[in-house]
Amino acid sequence: MQLDFLTNLAAWGFALLVYPGLLFAALLALVGHWLAGLIAPLFMPKLYRQRTRIGAFFGPILLISKLLGRKNAARWQADSPASAPAADSSSLVAENLLVLAGVIASLIALALMPLVGNPVTEQLGVSSNLFVILALLAVYPLVSVAVQARSGGLSGMAAAQTVGSLLTGLLPTLLIVAALIQVAGSHTLSMASLLEAPVTPQQTFVRVLAGVALLVALPWWLGGATLRDTGRPGAGLLAGKLVQTAALSVFWSLLVLPLPGDAAWSYILPALGALFACLAMRLLSDLWVPSRRPSDAANLAWATTLPLAIFAFILGLLGNS
């Protein structure tokens, strides 16, 4: 009994802290952030281009470290310290616990994903239930909503915008997941069953549609929508966003890319797919959304993802009929 407990503890500890957990997520998010900094200026007018330095690789970590040195680092940071509302100790503890819950939920979602070499799914045989993974991925944007709402003022208005962002990405994602389940013919919510399904031309086409739609829909699960003069996330939310970005990228890679038969490529391809998704989502966030009003960006996302998701869902139904 004690040996089984230690085995489970070691497997969960490795999955949460190393692979595919915190260390893997940090490396994936940092590389994606750095590559986006190199590529994004190529799509900007020369007047606005900035040279990206090698040191920018650790930019997110340095920013989080800097914010940790502030008072009430987990709170939503007001642009002006004088405008920051005072908070009692119990409120700060509650916000710290909320932020911690958001980070842990994203880490657990990563630990449940059936990546090759994941000790939780391979050694312990824990099911990679899609409903559970989606529910865990939804925790971080909801935590972001709660932290913004507790800050009051204009940040409370930004919290409502964050709820709209999550809803913008939720429906297309659910339709795409349903389409992939249908076309795979598995009729189960296990992500592992989708990976093990035989690859057919129809399934490949549905995965292509799903890949395009998810690249637009998943960035809306990152939360943190802001209005002018509402401040910016604290250290905890920024750290959670790094982990959430990695979790969404791995989620995209496993749903869209086929599982290679070669042992070496079964490690490499999902990682490369996750890096591509991380880079693409970052570029969309940097180049597409900021150039539009929030309502226009949301309408464009709906117009892009919803038709693709519905088409993929109909193909999945036809392929299984």
Image (cartoon, rainbow, N blue to C red):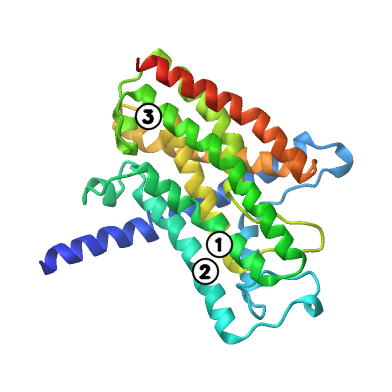
What x and y, as percent, mark residue 93? Answer: 53, 80
Residue named by callout 3: 181
Instruction: Kindly identify the residue that appears in the image at 69 percent across and 45 percent down.
Output: 37
The numbered disc on residue 98 is 2
What x and y, as percent, mark residue 154? Answer: 77, 64
Residue named by callout 1: 143
- Tell me the SS state at disc 3: helix
- How many residues crowd around disc 2 within 10 Å: few (fewer than 14), some, or many (20 or more)? many
Mark 2–mark 1 distance (CA, rounded to whole Å): 6 Å
* Type of amino acid at the residue the image marks with label 3: Ile
In the image, 240: left or right of 57?
A: left
What x and y, as percent, mark residue 91? Answer: 58, 80
- Tell me the SS state at disc 2: helix
Marks 3 and 2, the one that precedes in the sequence:
2
Residue located farthest toward the right when viewing the structure as drawn: 47
- How many residues crowd around disc 1 within 10 Å: few (fewer than 14), some, or many (20 or more)? many
Name the residue nearer the viewer: 189 or 265.
Answer: 189
What x and y, as percent, mark residue 77? Answer: 71, 70
